[in-house]
Amino acid sequence: MFEYHEPRSLAEVTSLLAAHGEAAKVLAGGTDLLVQIRKGRHQPRHLLNIKTVPGLDQVNFAEDCVEIGAAVTLHDGEKFLSAYPEYAVLCRAMHSVASCQIRNRATLAGNVCNASPAADTVPALVVLGANVKIHGTHGDRLVPVDRFLTGPGRTVLLTGEVVSAIVLPRMNGGGGRGVFLRKARRPSLDLATANVAVYAAGESCRIALGAVGPTVIRVREAERLLARQGLTAATAAEAARLARSAAKPITDVRGSDEYRLDLVSALTEQALLTLAMEVRA
Ligand SMILES: Cc1cc2nc3c(=O)[nH]c(=O)nc-3n(C[C@H](O)[C@H](O)[C@H](O)COP(=O)(O)OP(=O)(O)OC[C@H]3O[C@@H](n4cnc5c(N)ncnc54)[C@H](O)[C@@H]3O)c2cc1C
């Protein structure tokens, strides 16, 4: 049994979290949390529904960033950002999560906070250089998405802290383009066996891998190679080999470690070749 709260401000959320510590859990869309409670993985005594906090369901465009409030669903996030081609990599990742029904409840922030190694939006957020905005009793702090995640189901959130937004840098017409690809056992309603996001802006190219390690993996050696030699069929193949070396997959019901290594290499090469065509177009 738990007590259900409908806080009306972030200050109320943080004071409830600080007061109840481990016994309290933030509830956003509930598409992960309610399943976990039913399986007995969490037994919170207090559930704090952040969808009742006014303003958290907004996407705010500022001069240097876009703040996606913690109650913005994957469906609405995709709808708001679809007019901006530089964020297409994130739109594709959001669209690939589960089903339309789930995307209408599930939030972008919840996908990050759940800290699943297979979360689809995480590699896309990492290649975009996104930050997590954390609100606590001492104010706000920003943490890059890859540093926010410390392991399966683990984040840097401290007692009393809540994520208030996901913050994307404004690309301001810099012409950046990205590609997100995933492979799962079936086309939808299954977590990815592996997923890959790539993003190029000017001379720089970023590559992030999901579901092939305890948290998202940046393939920095491949990124340096692409910055030095440019994106060609030959460098895409070499980058794919480097992605395979950087991955640290496990064997589970979704696939063996060897299969995931092959997958990550194939997805990386395909994503880079697609990106090369998009950049030229
Ligand atoms: C059938 C099914 C298929 C799915 N398929 C996919 C898939 O293909 N790809 C994929 O990536 N995911 C998939 N998921 C997982 C899930 O839908 C996403 O992870 C979802 O985005 C979680 O968001 P939520 O708002 O529902 O989070 P919730 O379930 O409400 O919360 C998840 C966790 O994050 C914490 N949390 C949430 N918001 C905050 C916050 N603002 N501050 C601090 N902590 C917070 C909660 O306490 C909880 O621990 C699937 C789920 C189901 C049930």
Image: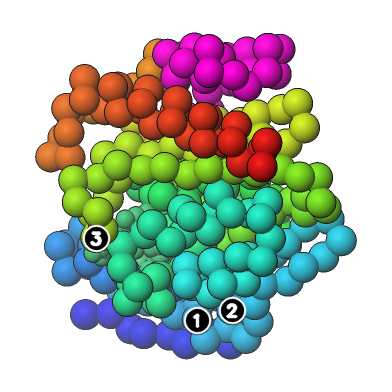
Q: Nearer the viewer, residue 180 or 54?
A: 180
Residue at point 16%, 62% (across, down): 40
57 w.r.t. 132: above or below? below
User: Which residue is labeled 2 in the image?
Assistant: 57
Main SS of residues in magenta:
helix
Q: Callout 2: few (<14), some (14-19), or many (20+) C-alpha neighbours within 10 Å? A: many
Q: CA distance from mark 3 to mark 1?
A: 24 Å
Three-letter residue code for mark 1: Lys
Q: Is mark 3 within 8 Å of ligand 1?
A: yes
Residue count near mark 3 (Cα–Cα under 10 Å), binned few <14, some 14–19, many ≥20: some
Q: Specify whether residue 238 is in view.
A: yes
- The quarter of the picture where residue 168 lies is bottom right
| Label 1 CB sits under 8 Å from any ligand 1 atom | no
Look at the numbered discs 3 and 1 and tell me whether their residues touch, using CB distance below 8 Å: no
In this view, the residue in front, 254 or 83, is 83
Q: Which residues are magenta?
A: 213-241
Secondary element type, mark 3: loop
Secondary structure state at the residue bearing disc 1:
helix
Under mark 3, the amino acid is Leu
Using the rendered view, name the quadrant where residue 29 is placed: bottom left
Dot placed on the residue nearer the N-terminal end, 3 or 1: 1
The quarter of the rendered structure image containing the C terminus is: top right
Disc number for residue 51: 1
Disc with the residue nearer the chain's start (2 vs 1): 1
**What x and y, as percent, mark residue 54?**
62, 86
Q: Tag on residue 189?
A: 3
Kindly indicate whether the residue at mark 1 contacts the one at mark 2 (C-beta within 8 angstroms): yes
